[in-house]
Image (cartoon, grey):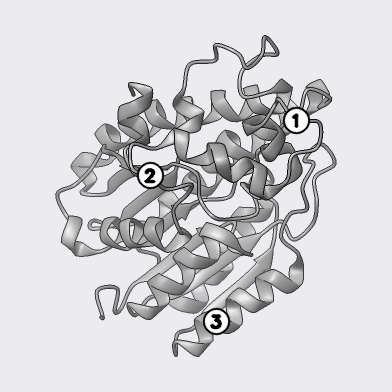
Amino acid sequence: MGRMTGKVAFVTGAGRGQGRSHAVHLADEGADLVIVDIGEDIDTNSYPLATAADLEETARLVEKSGRRVIAAQVDVRDRVGLKGVLDDAVADLGGLDVVVANAGICPLGNDIPVQGFVDAFDVDFVGVVNSVHVALPHLKPGGSIVVTGSVAGLVPQIGINGQGGMQGAGGDGYGLAKKMIRDYTKSLALTLGPSRIRVNAVHPTNVDTDMLHNSAMYQTFRPDLAEPTREDAEVTFPFMQAMPVPYIDASDISHAVVYLASDESRYVTGQQLFVDAGASLKLGL
């Protein structure tokens, strides 16, 4: 306990899922938080996104740890909006030490229009870039940037059932974004190394969140069924991993995020950390 005492962390996509878990774990270790989420749906994304009420609940959980928190409903695609929120929050909290660029969507389905590619790429890559770049003026030596990637997004876009990447335009946008995150974090780590600011990416396998548990994802894993259920998909979820598990918990990713955010990783930078039960090994990544 206390590995983040005296630090301020900025977490995007904090309304639920991995983002909420990261925020709470960082708070439990002593960090004050700036948390943001879009708080509304995106038309091309087939499953519901976090709500404003979800973000408020994350803030409540952070406060339960006894930490200060500033929460704002803002779209990571809106760099001007992000900058305004973060600049004000840093002024109130007294600084910024950690960025966790986590916000993401995965709009799967062969019926997703081309706009789904645009939305997925803009949230999953441009949104990461926006979040990191508005934070850079505030980071000082010892700062840490952690970006959420994806094992599935690093798989070559070789097609599923002849329908394109991870299934449709949205899946292709998601995959491209995650691939670019790998190169972006490596390059940025070199750029920021002389400033003693670390940059790392964490690449999860299936995670037990709403991004995994929705009908479009079930269809991707069970294309042999017209309307697969969660139980149907869970038969094939373990095929991704070397370990016989269908998915991991958001907290498994949070433990890695806290390590990379803390001074324990002060000389760890430019790394692509797979928290994936061996999925990257099976996929040859």
Which quarter shows the C terminus? top left
Decide: is 5 above or below 254: below
Q: Position of residue 63 (x, y in %)?
A: 52, 86
Q: Quadrant of residue 67?
A: bottom left
Q: How packed is label 1: few (under 14 Cα within 10 Å), some, or many (20 or more)?
A: few
User: Which disc is residue 225 wearing?
Assistant: 1
**Residue nearest the viewer, comparing 249 with 35:** 249
Q: How packed is label 2: few (under 14 Cα within 10 Å), some, or many (20 or more)?
A: few
Tag in front: 1 or 3: 1
Q: Position of residue 109 (x, y in %)?
A: 76, 28
Q: Position of residue 102 (x, y in %)?
A: 51, 51
Q: CA distance from mark 1 to mark 2?
A: 23 Å
Tag in front: 2 or 3: 2
Q: CA distance from mark 2 to mark 3?
A: 32 Å
Q: Quadrant of residue 110?
A: top right
User: Which disc is residue 61 wearing?
Assistant: 3
Side of 241 relative to 119 (left or right): left
Between discs 1 and 2, the one toward the N terminus: 1
**Residue nearest the viewer, comparing 146 with 151:** 151
User: Tags 2 and 3 in contact by the CB under 8 Å rule?
Assistant: no
